[in-house]
Amino acid sequence: MAADVGIEALVEEAAEVNQSLSRQGDQGAQGRGPGRVRGRGRSRNRREARSGQAIRANVSEVLRAKIKKAKTSDKVWGILLRHERNMSVSLVCLAAVRLRRLSKRERRNTSDNGRVRSRGERVLVSLVRRRLPSMNTKHVATILHSMAALRLSVDDGDLAASLIDRFVLLVDGANGQAIGNMVWACGKLGRFPDKESLERILRRLLSVSGECNSQNFSNTLWALGTMAEQGRGDVVSDPTLELLLSCYVCKLSESVPQGMSNVLWALARLGYEPGGDVVQRIVRELLSRPRDQMKPQDLANALWSLGRLRCDVGVEDLAALASSSVEMIETFNPQELSLTLWGLARTDPSLLHDDGYARILRAVVAKCHTFNAQALSTTLWAVGKIGRVPPPDHMYSLTEAVLTRLGRFTPQGLSNVLWAMTSLSYSPGPVALREISAEVSRKARRIPGKSLASIMKSFALLQYTPADAAMRGINDAFLMQLPDCAPQSLCLLLWSYASLGQSPGKRVLDELHARCWELLPECTVPQQANQLWCYATLSYDPGQDFVTELSSRFASSLDEASPQSIANLVWAVASLGYALGNVQEAALVMEILRRCQRSEFSGQELTNLVWALAVMGAGGDGFSDVWGRAADAVMSAGEAKGRQKQLAQLFHSKLLLRGDYALPGDLGNEAEGAWREIVSSKEPVLSRFHHQVSACLGRLGVHHDCEVYTQNGYLSVDILLEGAGGSKVVVEVDGPSHFSSNTLKTNGSTLTRNELLRRWGYDLVSVPFFKWPAEEGKQDAFMRKALGCVL
C-alpha cells in the first residue's frame, strides 16, 4: 500500500508540473498568432501533458529533486522503499551518491532507523541487479564506490563480482575517474578482478593518463596495496607499477597529503622500492604542505611506510617528518601512535631526541587503555627496538593494558610483547608472566614452532619458568610441529630449557634429539656447539655416535666457529663424559692457539677450555701454550667479575693434569685459595639417600664419618671409613646429578672426582641411586658386596 500511495503522490506532483507546462504552452501559442494555430498548439501540449512518457519524465524529475533535497540518509532510504519501480539507472546512482555523502556527514554510516536502512539496502541491491545491463562504466564505478563507502551489510559478494565483470567488459570506454573510483572500491570491498582483467583496467588508465588527476592514480595505487595486504601474491607487474607511479609523480603537486601517504603505504605493502629519488620527492612534497592540511593518519602512514621501504630518504627529511609527528602527537589515535613508533623504530631512532620520545611515550601511556591488542603489540615492539627504556610507571601502564586484552593477542603479538620486555630488560613480575604463559599455552597449537621457540627464549631471558601445565602445553604444541621445525628453532628451544635449568623430560628430549639427528647435516657450526652445550647443561646423553659425528663436523669447519662456540663445544664434550678423537683434539688445540694469538677468547672461555681439555686428558706442547695463555688472561683480569670462578677452574685443571703445569707468581696461591673457598662453602646437607647408606653401614657395624674432607682438603667426600690394612675408603652416595638423565651415564665432573680420589690413594666405592634397593635387608646385602673387596 505504501508504494501505491507514494506513486499516486508522485503522479499528482507530475500532473501539477504538466499543467504548468500546459499553461506555458498556451501562453506561447497566444504570442505566436491567431485562430487555428493557437488551438493546434494548445491541443498538442495537452496531449503531451496527458501522455505516459511525459508523466514518467516528470516523475523522474520529481524523484531527482527529492533525492537532492534529502537532508538525512533515512529520507533517501525511504524514497528507495516507496518508489522502487520508478528508479532508473541514473536515479539509483544519484541515490547511492547521496547516501554516501549523507552517511559520511552523519558519522560511522549509521542510521537513526536501523529497520529502514536494512530494508533500503535490500531494495538498493535489488535495483542494482535489475538495472545492471543498462549501466555504463560511470554507473558501475559510482555504485561500487557507494557500496564500499556505505559498507553495505547485505551479502553483496555476487553483486560486486557482477559489477566488476560489467566494468571490465566496458573498460575501453572508461575515463580515469571511473577507473580510480572503481579500483578504490574494489580495495574497500575486498573484491578484485582477476589478474588479466586488472591489467586491462590499468592499461586503460595509462592510455587516458593525460585526462586523469593525481587522485585517480593515488586511489588506484592504494587499491593495489590493499590487494597485496590481503595476500593476493604478485598483484601487478613491476613495469606497470612503475608507469602508474611515474604518472602520479608527474601530478604530485596536485596531490593532497592523504594521497601522498596512501601512495607510500601502497608501495610498502607491494614491497616495491622505486629507483631514483621518487620516495624522497613524495616525502618532501608532503612536508611542504601547511600543517593544517595534514592529518595524523597521513604522518603515521608515511613513517610506517618509510620503515617498510628502507628507501634512501635524506636525514633532514626524516627528522622533519619525525618532528612534525611529535608536534601533533597528542591528536594521534591509538593506531596512529603505534604506527608512528614502529616507523621511527625501523627508520632511524637516533633522529628522535629525548624530549620528543618522552612526549610520544606520554601520549601512548595516556591512551594505552584504549589500544587494541595489535596496537599494543606494535607499540611495545617499537619501544623495544628503539631501546630507550621508558620510566617504570610507563612500562607498568603498558603491561596492565596488555593483561586486560591478553585473550585478544595473536601468537605473533604475544611473541612481540615478550621480545620487547627482554630487549628492555624489564620483567613485569611473576603474576603477569604467569598470565602471559597461560595464554601462550592456550594458544600454543596455533603458534608456529619458530614463534614458540622465540617465546621460550624470552621466558629464559626473563628468568621465568612457566608452570608445569603451561610448559606441557608448549612442549606438546612444539612436538606436533617437529617434522617441520628448522635447526634454529630446535636450538633456541633447547637453549631456553638449558638456561632455565628446566628439563622438559626424557620423552620430549628424546623426540627433540631424534629431530636433531635428522637435521645435523643442515646445522651451522654455532648450532652444533649450541646443541651439545644444551645437552650437557640438561644432563642429557646424546650418545657416542652423535658426539663423534657432531665433533667431526665441527672440527672440519673451525674457520666458521666463534670463540664462544669452540669453548662451548669442548666444555660440553668433557661435561658429558666423552673425549675427542686425537685428530679432532689436535685440530681444536691448534685453532685455539691461533685464536689466542689474536686475543679472541675471554678469560672465562679460556679457563673453560683448559678445564675441558684437562678432563679429557689433553697434554703436549700445544696444550702447554693454551695453559699459559689462560693463566695470563686470569692474572691480568684483576678484580673482574667471575675471576674467582676462573681461578678455581685453573686449580681444578692443575689437579687433573699429570704434567707440571705451574701457575706464575702468586696466581697459584690465589687459585688454590679460590678452590678451597668453593669446597668449604658447601653446606653439608645429607639427603635421604645419604642417611639410608649411613644407617646401613651402622647396621653392619662399620664405623664411618659423613661429609669429611680429604687429607689435602681439596675435596669433601660423602662417607669416609677405614679399610683393610688401614686403607682409606671413600663411599660416594651418587644421586641423579652424577648421571645423565636418560642413559644414566656417569658425567664428566663425577669421573674427574673419582679419578682424583684414586690418584690420592683412596679406595672408592660408588653407590648409584638407581642400584640402591628399597628394603633394608637388600640394602645390607648390597653394601656387604660393595665393601667386600676393601674391608
Image (tube, rainbow, N blue to C red):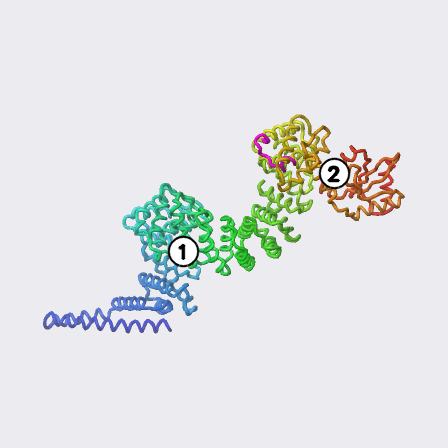
Nearest the viewer among 582 and 517 is 582
Quadrant of the image containing the C terminus: top right
Label 1, residues with CA under 10 Å away: few <14, some 14-19, many ≥20: few
Nearest the viewer among 586 and 168 is 586
Looking at the image, is mark 1 or mark 2 earlier in the sequence?
Answer: 1
Q: CA distance from mark 1 to mark 2?
A: 66 Å
Quadrant of the image containing the N terminus: bottom left
In the rendered image, which residue does mark 1 sit on?
Answer: 327
The residue at the far top in this view is: 621
- Magenta run includes residue 601: yes
Task: Tell me the kind of residue under disc 1.
Answer: Glu
Residue 18 in sight from this viewpoint: yes
Disc number lying in front (1 or 2):
1
Q: Position of residue 410 (x, y in %)?
A: 53, 53
The residue at the far left in this view is: 34
The residue at the far front in this view is: 666
Label 2, residues with CA under 10 Å away: few <14, some 14-19, many ≥20: some
- Magenta run includes residue 116: no
Task: Tell me the kind of residue under disc 2.
Answer: Thr
In the rendered image, which residue does mark 2 sit on?
Answer: 750
Q: Secondary structure at mark 2?
A: helix
Nearest the viewer among 390 and 489 is 390
What is the span of residues highlighted in magenta in the rendered image?
Answer: 595-607
Nearest the viewer among 442 and 416 is 416
Q: Position of residue 117 (x, y in %)?
A: 41, 67
Tell whether 696 sits left or right of 301: right
In the image, which disc is placed on residue 690?
none
